[in-house]
Amino acid sequence: ADLYGIRDWGAGYFDVSDKGLLTVTPERAGNKVALPLLDIVQEIRERGMDMPVLVRFEDLLEQQIGRLNNAFRKAIADTGYQAPYRGVFPIKVNQQCHVVEEICNVGAQFGHGLEAGSKPELIIALAHLESPDAHIVCNGYKDQEFIDLGLHACKMGYSCFFVVETPTELPIIIERSRALNIKPLIGVRVKLASMVGGHWTATSGDRSIFGLSITQLVEVVDTLKAEGMLDCLQLLHYHLGSQIPNIRDIRTGVTEACQVYMNLVREGAAMGFLDLGGGLAVDYDGSNTNYIHSRNYTLEEYCADIIDVIMSTLNPEQIAHPTIITESGRALVAYSSVLLFNVLDVASFQVGQLPESIPREEHRLIHSLKEALETMSGKNMQECFNDALFYRDEVRELFKRGQIGLRSRSLGENLFLAVMQKVLTLTETSPKQFQEADKLREQLSDIYYCNFSLFQSLPDVWAIDQVFPIAPIHRLDECPTREAIIADITCDCDGKVDRFTNMHDTKTTIPLHTLKDGEEYYIGVFLVGAYQETLGDLHNLFGDTNVVSVRLNDDGSHEFADELEGDSIADVLSYVEYQPQQLRERFRKIAERSTREGRITASERQEIMKAFSESMLGYTYYEKV
Ligand code: PLP
C-alpha cells in the first residue's frame, strides 16, 4: 500500500519499488529509469558527502519545461489559436545558476524566457538568453539604471519588456528612451478585482500592493497617447498570486484581463502580448482538489481554459489573439529537487519502569493515579482519563510548592503516561468514540530528530505553513509502527514539521519506522525546488546544504552532473562578518594563557588548536565521525 500517497503527489516521477524503495523516474532519449533514492544516497556517501543533501534531478526539470510548453502547444493546435505561447520563468523562484542555465538551455527550443524582478535578475537574464523569441519580462520597481540596461538590451535585439507597476515609473521610461533614442517595449501590470483563494489571496484585489488600478491604467494610456508612444504599449500583465488551487479563479482572472486587453486595443495601444503571471499550482498533497496545497485542474485543463476564455472574449470583437505569456515558476521547478536527511535520534513518550505496588507513604494522588490505571476499561475510559489529568496537574502543583519530591513527581508523571497509553490502546478496540483520541495520539507521538535545518531548507514550512510531501525513502514494504513529528537540529522550538500531507487535509503526525541498530534511516522531503533555496536563512548558523545534480545519460545510466559542497563553518561565520583567521588567533591566545596557567599542557594545546582549525573547515550539520 502507498501509505505516503507517493503515487498521488508523485506526478509519475516518484514511485515505490517492490523492494520497498522510493524511486524517482527521470526520462532521457526515450529511456525511463526508476532510480531508488537510497542508491543515490549511497553514491553521495561514497563521494564523502554527508547528509543533509539537496538532490536536483535535471531531467525532471527538463520534463516539466516540456510538459508545460507542449500542453500549451497542443491546446493552441487543437483550438486553432492564432498566436504562440511563450513562458517566462520567474528567476526569484529558484535563482541558482545551474537551474536557470538548465531552463534556458532546454527552454530555447520553446522560446521560454525569463522574468526579472530586480537588477541582479535582469543581469542573469541578459547573460543567459539569446533568441529574441525568448522574452524578458521586467517586473518590480525599476530605477534609471535598470531601465537603461533594459533599453540597451532592446537595441541589441532582446525582447525586453518593462512592465509598469507604479505610475512613477512611466516618466523615467519615457525620459530615458528619448535620451538614449531607443524605443521601449512597455507593459502594464493591472490590479484585477478578481480575488483568488489559497495562500496568496492578498496578491489579488484592490488592496494588492502591486500593479496599477484601472484609473491609473487610464492615466498611463493618456500619457503615452500624449507622448505619441501608444505603439510601445504592447503587453498586459497581471498576477493573482502563487498556487491558485481553483480553476474557476483562473478563469475569472483571465476573463477580466481579456476585457482590459480589449479596451487597451480599442484605445489604440499596439498590444500583442497577454501575460497571466504565475499561479499554476502544484498538487503537494495529491488530492487533486481545490484545497490550498493542491489544485482541482490538470495542466491540460489550465491551458485549454485560458485559451478558451481568450478566444471567446476576443473573437466576437475580431481582436487578434495575443501571444500568451505565463510566469510559471513553482510548477516548473518544484518537482526537480528533493531534500534528503538522516534521522539522528528519537524521543518517544513510552512508559518507564513502574513499581509493582505504590509504597504506602506515597502521596494519595499517586495512589489515585495507580488506581485510575488499574480500574480503567472501555466503559469508564473517559472518567479515568479526566481523573488522571486532574491528579497529574495536582501532582505538578504540589511539586511547585515543594510538598512532594522529584521521585514522587517522576512516578506520578510515569503513571499518568501509562494511563494515556492505555486510553489509546483501548480506543483502538472500543466501539465508542473517544473525542480526545486524535489530540492524545498527537501528544504522545514520537519526535524524530533529523539532520537538517527547517529555516535553511524548508523556510516556507515555518513562514507560511506550507506542506510538502515527506516520506522515508526505504523500508516502504514494512508497516511503520510509530507516529511521529519531525524536529530539525536548530535549537528553535519552531524547527519542527508537524503538518503532513494527507489528501485534501493535513495530519499532525507521520507514520515512521522504528530505528534499527547500526542502520541509517533516511527521509525525503519532496517537491522543494521552488522558493526554498534562497529564502532559507542561517538560523543557528546552519548553512547551505550539500547539493548534487543527477542526470541520466542517453544509455540510461546516470551521473552526478554537479556536486556543490555546502557551506563550511568558516563560510557561515564570514557571512555574519566574523573573520575565521581572527577567531583562530583569539582562541590561540586564550589557549596560550591556559597553558601558562597550567590548565593544559603545550601538547594538549596543539591538539586543541588542530581540532579548532579542522572544525572551521567542516560541514555545519551533524557529521558522522
Ligand atoms: N510572477 C510574479 C509577478 C510573481 O510575483 C510570482 C510569485 O508569486 C510568480 C510570477 C510565480 O508564481 P508561481 O510560482 O505560482 O508560478
Image (spheres, rainbow, N blue to C red):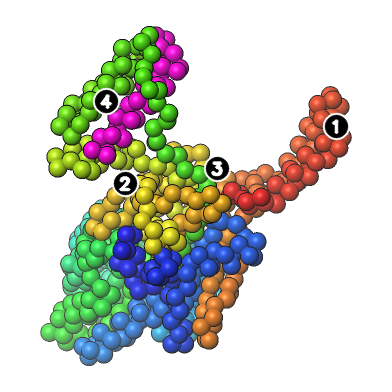
Q: Kindly check if marks 2 and 3 are in contact, taking CB atoms under 8 A apart as contact.
A: no
Q: Kindly check if marks 4 and 2 are in contact, taking CB atoms under 8 A apart as contact.
A: no
Residue 485 visible in image: yes
* Label at residue 540: 3
- For marks 2 and 3, give the one nearer the viewer: 2
- Does 416 lie within the magenta span? yes
The residue identified by callout 4 is: 374
Q: Mark 1 to mark 4: distance in Å?
A: 60 Å
- Given the image, on which type of amino acid does mark 2 rest? Thr
Task: Answer left or right for 505 relative to 104.
Answer: left
Tag 3: Cα neighbours inside 10 Å, few (<14), some, or many (≥20)?
A: some
Task: Answer left or right for 398 relative to 303.
Answer: right
Q: Mark 4 to mark 2: distance in Å?
A: 30 Å
Upstream in sequence: badge 1 or badge 3:
3
- Residue numbers of the magenta segment: 399-426
- Given the image, on which type of amino acid does mark 4 rest? Glu
The residue identified by callout 1 is: 601
Quarter of image, res 327: bottom left
Helix, strand or loop under label 1: loop
Q: Mark 1 to mark 2: distance in Å?
A: 53 Å
Q: Where is residue 73 in the image (x, y as percent from the top left)?
A: 31, 86
- Does 584 lie within the magenta span? no
Q: Position of residue 126 (x, y in %)?
A: 52, 75
Seen from the viewer's position, the closer of residues 559 and 464 is 559
- For marks 1 and 3, give the one nearer the viewer: 1
* Label at residue 508: 2
